[in-house]
């Protein structure tokens, strides 16, 4: 209940809300509604590298993959450092 | 020189992951390059406690099996730049861990980090044994409660027989971290005193972490409790970390700071 801007009701524990939200996002991904588990990432990385390797020579170590999962949207960021010679071409 | 520290207990639910996260973050806050590794294959939780669960791409098992480079699997903490996390796999089982694989990854980590904190799974099976095998030191997390103390004693036996350090030197330095300490229940005689537990386990005391509402709040938000300086638990972990790093800090049981009138009126968001 809010009277004159003061909150008299039991204050909602905001950290518990955070916990619930984090779990919902995480578990939605882990249960993965038919989507493959996180183990597809090494295969995805291999395929991307193979495709690129057909055109330019890249170092396996020069690949950086980052992921950010969110409620509505997940992003996968792949950075591949191209060798100097290839970039100049 | 780098140091591998295993956080172990035998019994589950005593606060291993909470402690590994708090100690790892605490060491990093002191400027040491630190990595915390989750050894609980199949039941990944360190990532949640450290608040990086949405950023896991590759894991410890991917690195062991050669599917990813170590550099790709390490997650940099967003709060402390000297801290990294190596998550484990949520989908594989314990057999994916091999002694050779663990040795190789720890060897690589030793080149880059000052402290490598291994968060052991509960139990005394393969995962727990591999988490401790290459350790230079151990932190045994114990609650002042009969089954926890008994399990800790069993784990101490394993530490002093099934670790490389013990095979070489005959013994491994082990510290006791007493957690979920409840002063009221100890006063009323329901719970064993610190001296009682120390007398039974006979290893040096690293710290006493009081039962604190801050611990649940910390795991809810994915922030290691050592960041919460107003909580008794947070300060207890800071002291324990200082002792681990070689400082001499007086052993005291810290209570939670009561919020002042100002804080109570205007509230604090966790």
Image (cartoon, coloured by chain):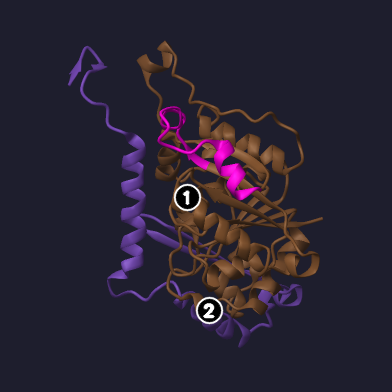
Residue A10, horizontal then vertical, whole percent:
23, 26
Total residue callouts: 2
- Farthest residue toward the right? B1
Q: Colour of chain A?
A: purple
Which span is picked out in magenta?
A: B179-202
Q: Secondary structure at mark 2?
A: helix
Residue marked by disc 1? B49
Residue marked by disc 2? B96
Q: Quadrant of the C terminus of chain B?
A: top left
Chain letter of the residue carrying label 2: B
Q: Colour of chain B?
A: brown
| A20 with respect to B142 (left or right) | left
Crowd rating for badge 2 (residues with CA inside 10 Å; few <14, some 14–19, many 20+) = some
Marks 2 and 1 on same chain: yes
Residue B197, horizontal then vertical, whole percent:
56, 43
Task: Tell me which residue sits at (35%, 43%) in the image.
Answer: A18
Q: Secondary structure at mark 1?
A: helix
Quadrant of the image occupied by residue B246: top right
| B112 with respect to A66 (left or right) | right
Q: In the image shown, does B72 or B8 lie closer to the viewer?
A: B8
Quadrant of the image occupied by residue B80: top right
Residue B100, horizontal then vertical, whole percent:
67, 79
| B51 with respect to B129 (left or right) | left
């Amino acid at each position: 209940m809010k009277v004159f801007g003061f909150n008299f009701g039991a204050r909602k524990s905001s950290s518990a809300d955070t916990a619930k939200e984090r779990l919902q996002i995480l578990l939605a991904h882990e249960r993965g509604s038919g989507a493959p588990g996180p183990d597809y990432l090494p295969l995805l990385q291999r395929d991307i590298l193979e495709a690129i390797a057909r055109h330019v020579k890249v170092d396996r170590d020069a690949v950086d993959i980052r992921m950010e999962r969110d409620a509505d949207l997940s992003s996968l960021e792949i950075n591949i450092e191209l060798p100097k010679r290839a970039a100049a071409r | 020189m780098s140091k591998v520290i295993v956080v172990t207990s035998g019994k589950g639910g005593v606060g291993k992951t909470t402690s590994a996260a708090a100690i790892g973050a605490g060491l990093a806050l002191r400027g040491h390059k630190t990595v915390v590794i989750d050894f609980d294959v199949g039941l990944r939780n360190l990532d949640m406690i450290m608040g990086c669960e949405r950023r896991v791409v590759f894991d410890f098992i991917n690195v062991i099996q050669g599917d990813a480079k170590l550099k790709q699997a390490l997650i940099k903490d967003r709060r402390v730049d000297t801290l990294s996390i190596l998550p484990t796999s949520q989908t594989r089982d314990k057999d994916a861990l091999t002694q050779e694989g663990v040795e190789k990854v720890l060897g690589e980590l030793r080149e880059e980090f000052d402290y490598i904190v291994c968060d052991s799974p509960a139990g005394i099976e393969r995962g727990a044994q591999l988490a401790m095998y290459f350790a230079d030191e151990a932190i045994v997390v114990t609650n002042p409660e009969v089954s926890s103390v008994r399990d800790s004693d069993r784990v101490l036996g394993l530490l002093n027989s099934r670790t490389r350090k013990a095979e070489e030197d005959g013994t491994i330095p082990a510290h006791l971290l007493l957690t979920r300490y409840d002063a009221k229940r100890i006063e009323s005689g329901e719970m064993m005193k610190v001296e009682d537990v120390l007398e039974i386990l006979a290893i040096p005391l690293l710290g006493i972490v009081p039962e604190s509402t801050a611990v649940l709040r910390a795991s809810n938000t994915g922030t290691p409790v050592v960041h919460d300086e107003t909580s008794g638990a947070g300060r207890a972990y800071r002291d324990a970390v200082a002792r681990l790093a070689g400082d001499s800090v007086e052993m005291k049981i810290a209570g939670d700071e009561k919020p002042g009138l100002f804080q109570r009126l205007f509230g604090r968001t966790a």
